[in-house]
């Protein structure tokens, strides 16, 4: 069987490959898109704009102005944040323009879906944010403005 460009394009379209990933929020209210952008800017001030290296199940979390933003490595091995992904997460809009306890992953390809996760929301919506921010993981680097 000979594959053509049209066949390949059709298969990719039906499989969902190439679709943009979106923020998924457990709570439909809370922060808005401007709060998200501000939270990422605050995160960058606290952790810098360079890519972060995270141990297995490690999160970097900022707590500023009533909101958190985090980068977590959910893999079983140390991983480095992909260049530009944090800004991609910042540019994606929240569902209906608002939300809390939100996550976005897989910004570059499906392989990284389970490894690099960004989180956003209201600090008051986090469960025990002092010890287990965002994903309930350990080895957290928690910084406040």
Image (cartoon, rainbow, N blue to C red):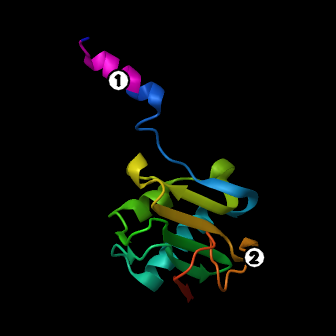
Q: Which residue is mark 1?
A: 9
Residue 3 to residue 94: above or below: above
> Disc 2 or 1, which lies upstream in sequence?
1
Q: Position of residue 1 (x, y in %)?
A: 26, 11
Which SS class for mark 1? Answer: helix
Magenta-tinted stretch: 2-11
**Residue at the image position 61 percent from the left and 82 percent from the top:** 64
Q: What main secondary structure does the magenta stretch of the protein show?
A: helix
Along the viewing direction, whichever of 87 and 126 lies nearer the viewer: 126
**Residue at the image position 46 percent from the left and 30 percent from the top:** 15
Q: In the rendered view, does 98 fall on the left or right side of 84?
A: right
Residue 38 picture quarter:
bottom right
Is residue 32 visible in the rendered image? The answer is no
Residue 73 to residue 129: above or below: above
Q: Which residue is mark 2?
A: 124
State how many labels appear: 2
Residue 41 to residue 90: above or below: below
Label 2 neighbour load within 10 Å: few <14, some 14-19, many 20+: some
Q: Position of residue 39 (x, y in %)?
A: 56, 73
Mark 2 vs mark 1, CA separation in Å: 45 Å
**Residue at the image position 42 percent from the left and 77 percent from the top:** 55
Point out the residue furthest to the top here. 1
């Amino acid at each position: 069987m000979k594959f053509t460009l049209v066949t390949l394009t059709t298969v990719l379209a039906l499989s969902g490959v190439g679709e943009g990933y979106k923020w998924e929020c457990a709570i439909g209210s809370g922060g808005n898109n401007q709060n998200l952008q501000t939270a990422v800017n605050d995160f960058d001030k606290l952790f810098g704009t360079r890519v972060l290296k995270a141990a297995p199940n490690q999160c970097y979390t900022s707590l500023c102005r009533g909101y958190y933003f985090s980068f977590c490595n959910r893999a079983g091995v140390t991983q480095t944040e992909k260049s530009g992904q944090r800004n991609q997460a910042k540019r994606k809009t929240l569902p209906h323009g608002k939300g809390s306890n939100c996550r976005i992953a897989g910004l570059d390809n499906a392989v990284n879906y389970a490894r690099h996760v960004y989180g956003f929301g209201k600090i008051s919506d986090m469960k025990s944010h002092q010890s287990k921010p965002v994903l309930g993981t350990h080895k957290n680097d928690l910084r406040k403005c």
